Image (cartoon, coloured by chain):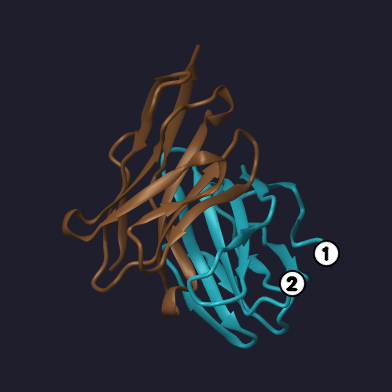
Chain colours: A cyan, B brown
Amino acid sequence: NAGVTQTPKFQVLKTGQSMTLQCAQDMNHEYMSWYRQDPGMGLRLIHYSVGAGITDQGEVPNGYNVSRSTTEDFPLRLLSAAPSQTSVYFCASSSAVYNEQFFGPGTRLTVL
Amino acid sequence: AQSVTQPDIHITVSEGASLELRCNYSYGATPYLFWYVQSPGQGLQLLLKYFSGDTLVQGIKGFEAEFKRSQSSFNLRKPSVHWSDAAEYFCAVGAGQAGTALIFGKGTTLSVSS
């Protein structure tokens, strides 16, 4: 049982490049979320999903796309990276409404 | 919209002293509240959560928090701080569809002096 896994751990992009941050969980959790963490800003919700095929926007969705084709995977796509997207990205999952969220180890992204 | 305020950016406490970290929330209905801790370079770990019932909740590592609806607060406390408690602490409220995601405060960094 690996929990929540994220790949890659580190990534450097140039402005305008695209990439996908991968998130997978093996706990059969229905709910998954993406957050970004910036110094002094805490964690901010980007997108979340309440099940396969169902996603919704969080606090800071602009510049990011998501889809959820399976229960296990919830990738985050940056279509055209900008320096403002330099951050640490965390994926999380939970099994029930208002239940504990389990966080992945994070992806540190730098956009030059 | 839900929001969480942690008024203290940085707190320094002597080892063995008591600790209280403040959290205020804005939410239209009964909030679902959480405290998470993040040690340097680490992920997030749940300390405790409040859903309903007893307003004083116990968590891991000797932490407790008290929900006060009249003050819209959910302050975290520990009677005696250990050096290993130095970390960043985040208060969060359930959000999204039926609380399936979290809105976090900006965090409080705790330093422990010897």
Answer above or below: position of B100 versus A83.
below
Label 1 close to label 2 by CB (< 8 Å): yes
The number of numbered discs placed on residues in the rendered structure image is: 2
Q: Could you tell me how far apart the alpha carbons at marks 1 and 2 are, in whole angstroms?
A: 7 Å
Q: Chain of mark 1?
A: A
Residue furthest to the top: B114
Q: Chain of mark 2?
A: A
- The quarter of the image holding the N terminus of chain A is bottom right
Q: Kindly tell me whether residue A68 is visible in this rendering.
A: yes
Give residue A25's quadrant in the image.
Answer: bottom right
Q: Looking at this view, is A31 or B51 the one in front? A: B51
Left or right: where A26 falls relative to B79: right
Q: Which residue is mark 2?
A: A27
Give residue B17's quadrant in the image.
Answer: top left
Q: Are dots 1 and 2 on a single chain?
A: yes
Left or right: where B29 falls relative to B88: left
Left or right: where A25 falls relative to B28: right
Q: Which residue is mark 1?
A: A1
Q: Secondary structure at mark 2?
A: loop
Name the mark on residue B27. Answer: none
Q: Secondary structure at mark 1?
A: loop
Residue at screen point 62% across, 68% down: A93
Residue at screen point 64% across, 36% down: B41
**What amino acid is at disc 1?**
Asn
Q: Looking at this view, is B16 or B96 the one in front? A: B16
Residue at screen point 32% across, 44% down: B6
